[in-house]
Image (tube, rainbow, N blue to C red):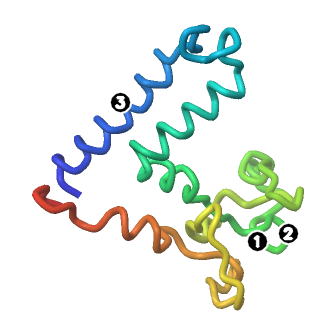
Amino acid sequence: MSAAVWKRRALRAEGAVYHALWMRPLGPHWAGDGIETAEQMRARFHEHMERTYPDLIVRDRHRRIEVFHVADGCGCDPEAEDFEEQHSESGEDGEYLCSKRFLGYVCGSCEDEDGEGPAWKPYAVLWPCPPIVALDEPVKGVQA
């Protein structure tokens, strides 16, 4: 992607953060019965984000996740000096992972119901997934 595309994305993210940081509860004049509750304020913020920054919501929901080989059977020497250091993170099943055996990236929310994903995670969708690919297509008037 070009610098112009990255700049546009950064400015949109900055606008969303600015709105979140400076948002305040509405007072009695706007909220009706007293000051706006936290739940009402959250709902108002989400409505604003969905209306103004739908692309940021899609990017948040479709984050890339790193996938590593499970430590059991990774082929590393358990007597190696750095074995514990390289096999200390646990996966979603509580098993240790081998940080030396990176398999790839998958989408955090997309699923392949047919099990036709990558061999190392058949029900996952490789990242970038279709929604992210659609967002990353060149924007009219902005060079990629």
Q: Which label number is shown at residue 15? A: 3
Q: Name the residue under label 2.
A: 72
Q: Decide: marks 1, 3 in contact (CB < 8 A)? A: no
Q: Name the residue under label 1.
A: 74
Q: Is mark 3 on a helix, strand or loop?
A: helix
Of label 3 and label 2, which has the lower sequence position?
Answer: 3
Residue depicted at 61% across the width and 60% down the height: 66
Neighbor class of circle 2 (other Cα within 10 Å; few <14, some 14-19, many 20+) is few
Residue 114 x %, y % = 70, 91
Residue depicted at 77% across the width and 55% down the height: 80
Amino acid type, residue under disc 2 in the picture: Asp
- Image-based side of 95 in relation to 20, left or right: right
- Image-based side of 69 in relation to 1, left or right: right
Residue depicted at 41% across the width and 53% down the height: 55
Q: In which quarter of the image is residue 134?
A: bottom left
- Image-based side of 79 in relation to 68, left or right: right
Q: Is mark 2 on a helix, strand or loop?
A: loop
Give 130 or 47, whichever is nearer the viewer. 47
How far apart are the alpha carbons under marks 1 and 2?
A: 6 Å
Q: In which quarter of the image is residue 104?
A: bottom right
Q: Is mark 1 on a helix, strand or loop?
A: loop
Residue 13 x %, y % = 38, 37
The residue most toward the right is 94
